[in-house]
Image (tube, helix red, strand yellow):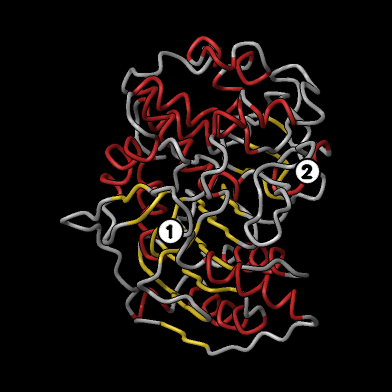
């Protein structure tokens, strides 16, 4: 039974400036940031034999709370029109698929920080293929440029756990840069964050980890490595640099070869790069909604497998460190963090990848139920609504 919902929406705003911001976020969160700067994103290759992702039949749709949950999902999207796409999968079958606004089945949905979880998958493969000898190797032994700072003093495992102690983060896991970074084209004012200057080719990942960006970072070296969880982009950028150093490939290229081709996506995708061609590990990954579903179904298979990669995934998707109130993490509904995956939700099951502005990838290996949702704005009830929907769905198994 195929359920595809199309909604035409109008967003009312209180100011022209706010309206412009909303349009920008919607435009880029569906379709991504391809072609807006001098950087060239890596193109993930479509598989010649895509993984099947069928719709549930009538009997499957009527069981395990699927019909009721599909109705709740439809109501959620009507209530929160900034949701551009949602996909619910039960035991490998689609039970709900919906798009609105600029979302549609042919558009790529931008990951925001779910890319961090994708980076973790590449790290796991590097360990199991022998390119990375151990998660307990110090990052500075692999990348000499960061040897003297907290990134380099941390082990790969500590970077995976967001516990380098490199800086106290502010909004979206970014530090405060004295004087900002780069320049806005229209106003000439500096950016407060790191994503746009990298995207526009004004700074590189190296600048963030050991160059001018690191020199401008405030609240540096706030804790010893492994001491405390603080969510931040820098730890993931360091992981991406490690993969590129030890494999001789870009992170995106390595992911394409060893993860994406195993997923068997039906369409191509993209991952952003900086001006030097390095993959922006903490963000910038984008594929179609159904291919996000294929990633989830593949993970459900792999997390149950014996052997090195299955062992890694079971560690990565269970709590390795408790979250804390430091660095803006006090409001998170997750009590734990694995290896770039959120764990131990206060109200909902499974492990989660999450991204700024409403990106959510929730996977429960016990029930094989998956919730995937993309959007471009956070307001009251958006995140609690999806966790409530996901929790209630699990009451009928």
The correct choice, above or below, for 279 with respect to 71 in the image is: above
Q: Determine contact: label 2, label 1, CB under 8 Å.
A: no
Q: Counting other residues with Cα less than 10 Å from the Cα at mark 1, is it few (<14), some (14-19), or many (20 or more)?
A: some
Give the camera-side residue of 307 and 21: 21
What percent of the width, then of the height, locates residue 39?
A: 43, 47
Q: Specify whether 87 is left or right of 148.
A: left
Q: Counting other residues with Cα less than 10 Å from the Cα at mark 2, is it few (<14), some (14-19), or many (20 or more)?
A: some
Q: Specify whether 214 is left or right of 293.
A: right
Give the camera-side residue of 204 and 135: 204
Query: Which label was assigned to residue 378?
Result: none
**Front label number (2 vs 1):** 1
For marks 2 and 1, give the CA distance.
Answer: 26 Å
The image quadrant that residue 396 belongs to is bottom right
Residue at the left extreme? 48
> The N terminus is located in which quarter?
bottom left
Give the camera-side residue of 363 and 253: 253
Residue for badge 2 = 170
The correct choice, above or below, for 126 with respect to 18 in the image is: above
Residue for badge 1 = 34
Q: What secondary structure is marked by label 1?
A: loop
């Amino acid at each position: 039974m195929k359920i595809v919902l199309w909604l035409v929406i109008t967003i009312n705003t209180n100011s022209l400036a706010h309206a412009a911001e909303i349009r920008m976020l919607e435009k880029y969160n569906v379709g991504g940031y391809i072609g807006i700067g001098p950087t060239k994103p890596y193109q993930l290759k479509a598989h010649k034999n895509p993984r099947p992702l069928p719709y549930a039949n009538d009997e499957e749709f009527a069981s395990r709370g699927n019909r009721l949950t599909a109705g709740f999902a439809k109501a959620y999207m009507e209530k929160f029109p900034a949701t551009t796409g949602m996909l619910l999968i039960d035991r490998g079958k689609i039970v709900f698929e919906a798009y609105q606004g600029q979302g549609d089945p042919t558009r790529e949905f931008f990951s925001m920080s779910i890319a961090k979880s994708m980076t973790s998958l590449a790290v796991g493969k590097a360990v199991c293929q022998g390119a990375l000898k151990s998660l307990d190797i110090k990052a500075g032994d692999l990348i000499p440029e960061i040897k003297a700072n907290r990134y380099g003093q941390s082990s790969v495992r500590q970077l995976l756990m967001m516990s380098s102690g490199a800086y106290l983060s502010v909004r979206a896991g970014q530090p405060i840069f004295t004087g900002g970074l780069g320049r806005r084209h229209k106003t000439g004012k500096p950016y407060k964050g790191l994503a746009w200057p990298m995207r526009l080719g004004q700074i590189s990942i190296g600048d963030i980890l050991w160059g001018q960006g690191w020199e401008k970072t405030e609240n540096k070296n706030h804790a010893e490595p492994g001491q405390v969880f603080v969510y931040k982009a820098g730890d993931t950028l360091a992981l991406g640099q490690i993969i590129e150093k030890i494999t001789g490939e870009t992170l995106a290229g390595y992911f394409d070869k060893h993860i994406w081709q195993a997923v068997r996506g039906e369409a191509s995708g993209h991952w952003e790069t900086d001006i030097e061609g390095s993959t922006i590990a903490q963000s910038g990954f984008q594929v179609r909604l159904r291919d996000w579903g294929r990633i989830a179904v593949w993970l459900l298979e792999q997390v149950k497998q014996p052997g090195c990669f299955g062992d890694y995934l079971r560690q990565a998707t269970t709590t390795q460190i408790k979250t804390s109130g430091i660095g803006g993490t006090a409001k998170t509904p997750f009590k734990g963090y694995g290896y770039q995956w959120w764990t131990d939700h206060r109200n909902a099951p499974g492990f989660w990848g999450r991204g700024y502005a409403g990106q959510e990838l929730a996977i429960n290996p016990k029930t094989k139920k998956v919730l995937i949702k993309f959007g471009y704005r956070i307001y009251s009830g958006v995140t609690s609504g999806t966790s409530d929907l996901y929790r209630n769905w699990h009451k009928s198994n």
